[in-house]
Amino acid sequence: KIEDHSTAQRIILESLIQEMEAALRNIVVGICVFPIGVAFLWLSANSLHITETNWIGGLPALIHALTVMEVFLVPLLYFMWIDSSALVSKAKRMLDTKKIMEDSGCISSEKINSIVYSWLVATWQPFWKEADGIDLTDEVKIEKLFSSELKEIETNIKEFGKEGGSKVGLDATTSLESASWRAKKEGQREFLYFVLNFVAFYGYLLGILAYYFPDGDDGINAFPVVTSLNLGMTTSVADWTGNFAGDFCWTVEPVVILLSPIFLLRFSPTQKIKKE
């Protein structure tokens, strides 16, 4: 049908746009992560008390490194927050799609975009995501690949639209529950990343404030806003507490990164089904 053909074209276009946006975001993330990684050397040196020797610039160099880390951490915090919200929202929309499929046995093409299609066809891997072995200057081959991709998507859309259901639709419905569970847990993990990194961000910020805006001889800071940011603590106490909080959070985060895949694999609904 013409409707299915236009939907397939729209899905391909949306997928290509998403691929472009993901590439741009990866560039931004890379730009942010590199200076943070370099600055982290001074933070590690401080933990080993190398800062006190003045071998690598002493305390001023450490503060400059922390300032660089703070600046480039802000965009990453934003990405963590939107990723967390997007994944939790994705989990809910997956369950809504599953309910539609279960109630009617089908789903209309109007409700299928590139994201929903990737849920329904979990194995979908468009050729442009595996373009390493493709000669992009070979227009004839690219056109054939596009035609093949378009035809496959059209076929699946027709299957999803069959009243009374189809094997493709049944397989999609079965996989959506476990995929939704995984998306929700990944969203919660992203929120944990956000919390850990925000605490680290705030903690190291207190160290920068302590360097540039120390307390007076009477133990009172001349800047009320600094006192507020220090949560009522003296700058020396705030500096120590903030540094401890930052070090603690950035020690816990790698543990979460390493253990979370094991948790997802061990407790996912699909694993429970297999055990039964």
Image (spheres, helix red, strand yellow):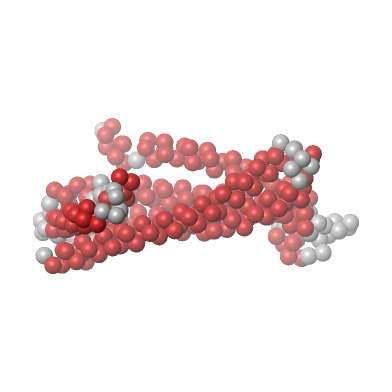
- The quadrant in which the C terminus is found is top left
User: Which is more toward the observer, 210 or 29?
Assistant: 29
For residue 183, above or below residue 273: below
Query: Residue at the location (23% across, 50% down)?
Result: 121
Q: Count every numbered label the image shows and give the total.
A: 0
User: Which is more toward the observer, 161 or 272?
Assistant: 161
**Image x and y of residue 134, in percent:** 29, 48
Locate residue 166 relative to residue 9 in the image: left or right: left
Query: Residue at the location (34% across, 40% down)?
Result: 268
Locate residue 7 relative to residue 47 in the image: left or right: left
Locate residue 266 relative to residue 200 in the image: left or right: left
Residue 153 visible in the displayed image: no
**Image x and y of residue 142, in percent:** 24, 55
User: Which is more toward the observer, 67 or 102?
Assistant: 67
Query: Residue at the location (10% across, 59% down)?
Result: 163
Which quadrant would residue 71 be assigned to in this image?
bottom right
Please identify the residue farthest to the top as the structure is shown: 275
